[in-house]
Amino acid sequence: MQDGKHVILCVDDDPDILSFLKIVLEGAGYVVTEAASAEEGLRVYKATPPDLVILDLMMEEVDAGTSFVKELKALGNKAPIYMLSSTGDNLAIATDYSALGLAGVFQKPIAKDKLIAMIKAKLG
């Protein structure tokens, strides 16, 4: 938490997605930290530990998202991690995302109301 607000780290290589997430989440009262790559995401994570992470599945490298999750596990991460994917619903059906250490998967494009409802349910 920062200034009494939950901190959400958003990691995505698409600046439009990052902008959308920042506008929506800050509008809902959250503090948003951003990163455009998994490598940058780790630096931001270490500098400002988040209460929740929203992460793109495929960024600069095909497995960047899953590698990032593994790195967070190694760091002892306790924050819920949500994956963003253009195959979101299909991924959730075909994959046991909890085995990857994920709290859930969001389908791109993200429905604003669904996003906020899920985060509020998770963070309280």
Image: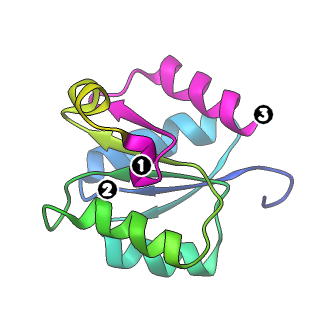
Residue span colored magenta: 97-124
Figure quadrant of the C terminus: top right
> Which of the labelled discs sits on residue 12, or is there none?
2
- Identify the element where label 3 is drawn: loop
Residue 37 appears at what percent x and percent y? 30, 69
Q: Nearer the viewer, residue 88 or 6?
A: 88
State left or right for residue 60 relative to residue 77: left
**Horizontal and vertical percent for residue 108?**
27, 31
Q: Quadrant of the N terminus?
A: bottom right
Secondary element at tag 2: loop
Q: CA distance from mark 3 to mark 2?
A: 24 Å
Q: Earlier in the sequence, mark 2 or mark 1?
A: 2
Extreme residue in the right direction: 4
Foreground: 58 or 13? 58
Query: What residue is shown with label 3?
Result: 124
Which residue does the image show at 25% across and 59% down from the upper left?
13
Instruction: Determine the CA span between mark 2 and mark 1.
Output: 22 Å
